[in-house]
Every structure is written in structure tokens, then in C-alpha cells.
Image (spheres, rainbow, N blue to C red):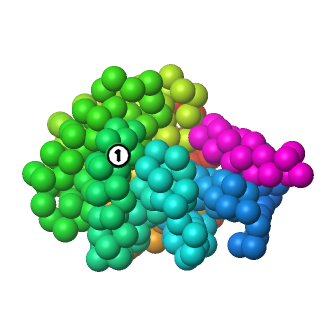
């Protein structure tokens, strides 16, 4: 019985580690092994939901993150579920709500978790929730306050041995700055995130940081002649679509509208003389890995 209770915990870790490494087959295997139904013990259900959520988040599929964590929102017994710093899910759920445009729902969910973490003085939880608050504040158009939220989140982590959380805050911070048009600042923050992810072996997020940096115009001079014809934003959109992302997923990943994704794709197709996503994928397979 004890081994069965621990099973989802082990596979939650396995799912997250392999998702961060970009080993999707192994990650999905661990998700399957971690499966638990709503009637199971909380110690089984929560890591099961987190395994699914972390894999979906690594893929940039925030709708599935919301779906994965929704069973936890509806649990009737909440004392251990909501204890700050114990199960790290409220920030992941709130971030996904923001990324899918459910801002009022995100605010309503986030506020009591922030209050509880502050009362308990749980710095790690305050930092994670600060990431979500920064995202939410920026999505409502208040970039300066969002900047303060991200900086405060980083300050909470300053003396804690949590490099992954620090990288995660910097990644969200950098994305937010780039969306606000503050490219020089965004480059600095995103490079901090990239370096931290690289040190952890989190290839999935190293690649996402690289896409953000290229979308902001960094290192475009090193592109092959074929890709050099594309603007930085076109390159970012084209790479995501070539890798199999839908227009909606590309829009969420790059903080732009679906209409803007469609606009960029039209120009990419025209410049390459192609007509389909499969042709685009084939064109990118011809590009050397260093690009």
C-alpha cells in the first residue's frame, strides 16, 4: 500500500525531468504511470495532476495545464492542498489561466493563495505566486507594476537554493518585457533564464529562450541565407509551426494574437514559395542545427 501511494510522486518527478530535457516519449510514459483518479488519496491525485501539468507547460500547451489541474480546484478537503510551499501547483494553474486569457478567474484564484503565503512567510511560494501576479498584471496592461512583481519574486529567491524557480521567473519576466517592447531589457533577463536552464540541462526551455531571443532580433546575423530573408518574428513563428505548433499554440508561446501568427505565416509562405505547413516543416529540416 505504501509503495502504491508513493508511485505517483516518483513518476511526477520523472515526467517533469524528461519534459524539461525534451524527451517527450519518456515524459508521457511517466504521466501514464502516475495516473490517479479523483477518488484516490490526495497524495496520489495531486502528483498525478502535476505530472500532466508540467509536461503540458513544457510544451507551451496552457489549455491542457488548466485541464490537468482542474481536479485540484474542486477538491473539498483543502487544508494540505493549499498549504504554501507544500504542493507547488497554484502558481502553475494561475499562470495557465493568464496565458489562456482568463484574467478575472486568475485573480480570484490567486489572491487567497498570495495572502496565505504572506501570512506563513513562505518565500518560495511567494516567489512562484509573484511570477503569476507579474503575468496577470502585465496582461492587464500595467507593465511597471508587473516589473516590480517579477523583481520582488526574484528577491524572495535570492538566498534560496532554487535555480529552477529563478529561471522560471526570469523566463516569464523576459517574455513580458519583450511583449512590452522593452527588447534590450528582455534580452538580458532571457539570457539569465537561458543560462540557468542550460546549467540544469533543461533543453526544452533553452530552446524556448532561444526562440524568444530570436523573436526579439538577437543573433539574426548568424542565420543561413534562407532564413535570413525572414524577420525575427517570422523566424519564430515559422520555427514553431514547422515543429508542429498550431496557430493558437504559436500565439500563446510568442505573446501575439492568432491573427498576427496568420499574418506572419502568409509572408513566410510567400518568401519561401511554399503553400503548406508540411512544406514549411520540410524547409526547416534542410536548415543546419546551429540555426
Q: Residue at x 50, y 27 (%)?
A: 198
Q: Is residue 263 visible?
A: no
Where is residue 154 drawn, in percent x and y?
28, 35
**Crowdedness near tag 1: few (<14), some (14–19) or many (≥20) residues, C-alpha within 10 Å:** few
Q: Residue at x 89, y 52 (%)?
A: 1
> Would residue 26 appear left or right of 219 to someone viewing this image?
right
**Up/down of 96 relative to 158, above or below:** below
| Magenta stretch: dominant secondary structure | helix
Q: Residue at x 56, y 35 (%)?
A: 203
Q: Per the image, is 219 magenta?
A: no
Where is residue 65 drawn, in percent x and y?
54, 64
Segment tinted magenta in the rendering: 1-22
Q: Residue at x 29, y 49 (%)?
A: 118
Q: Nearer the viewer, residue 268 or 118?
A: 118
Per the image, the residue denoted by label 1 is 120
Q: Secondary structure at mark 1?
A: helix
Q: Per the image, is 10 magenta?
A: yes
**Up/down of 102 relative to 194, above or below:** below
Q: Nearer the viewer, residue 177 or 240?
A: 177
Where is residue 194 drawn, in percent x and y?
41, 32
Amino acid at each position: 500500500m505504501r509503495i502504491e501511494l508513493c508511485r505517483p510522486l516518483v513518476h511526477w518527478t520523472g515526467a517533469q525531468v524528461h519534459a524539461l530535457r525534451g524527451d517527450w516519449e519518456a515524459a508521457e510514459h511517466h504521466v501514464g504511470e502516475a495516473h490517479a483518479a479523483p477518488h484516490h488519496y490526495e497524495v496520489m491525485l495531486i502528483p498525478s495532476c502535476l505530472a500532466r501539468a508540467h509536461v503540458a507547460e513544457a510544451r507551451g500547451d496552457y489549455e491542457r495545464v488548466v485541464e490537468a489541474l482542474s481536479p485540484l480546484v474542486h477538491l473539498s478537503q483543502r487544508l494540505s492542498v493549499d498549504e504554501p510551499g507544500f504542493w507547488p501547483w497554484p502558481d502553475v494553474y494561475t499562470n495557465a489561466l493568464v496565458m489562456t486569457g482568463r484574467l478575472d478567474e486568475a485573480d480570484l484564484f490567486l489572491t487567497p493563495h498570495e495572502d496565505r503565503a504572506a501570512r506563513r512567510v513562505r518565500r518560495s511560494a511567494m516567489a512562484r505566486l509573484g511570477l503569476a501576479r507579474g503575468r496577470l498584471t502585465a496582461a492587464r496592461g500595467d507593465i511597471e507594476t508587473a516589473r516590480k512583481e517579477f523583481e520582488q519574486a526574484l528577491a524572495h529567491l535570492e538566498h534560496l537554493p532554487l535555480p529552477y524557480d529563478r529561471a522560471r521567473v526570469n523566463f516569464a519576466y523576459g517574455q513580458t518585457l519583450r511583449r512590452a517592447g522593452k527588447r534590450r531589457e528582455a534580452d538580458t533577463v532571457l539570457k539569465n533564464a537561458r543560462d540557468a536552464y542550460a546549467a540544469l540541462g533543461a533543453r526544452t526551455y533553452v530552446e524556448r529562450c532561444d526562440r524568444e531571443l530570436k523573436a526579439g532580433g538577437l543573433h539574426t546575423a548568424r542565420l543561413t541565407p534562407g532564413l535570413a530573408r525572414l524577420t525575427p518574428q517570422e523566424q519564430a513563428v515559422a520555427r514553431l509551426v514547422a515543429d508542429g505548433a498550431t496557430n493558437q499554440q504559436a500565439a500563446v508561446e510568442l505573446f501575439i494574437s492568432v491573427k498576427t501568427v496568420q499574418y506572419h505565416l502568409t509572408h513566410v509562405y510567400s518568401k519561401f514559395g511554399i503553400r503548406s505547413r508540411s512544406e514549411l516543416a520540410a524547409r526547416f529540416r534542410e536548415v543546419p542545427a546551429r540555426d
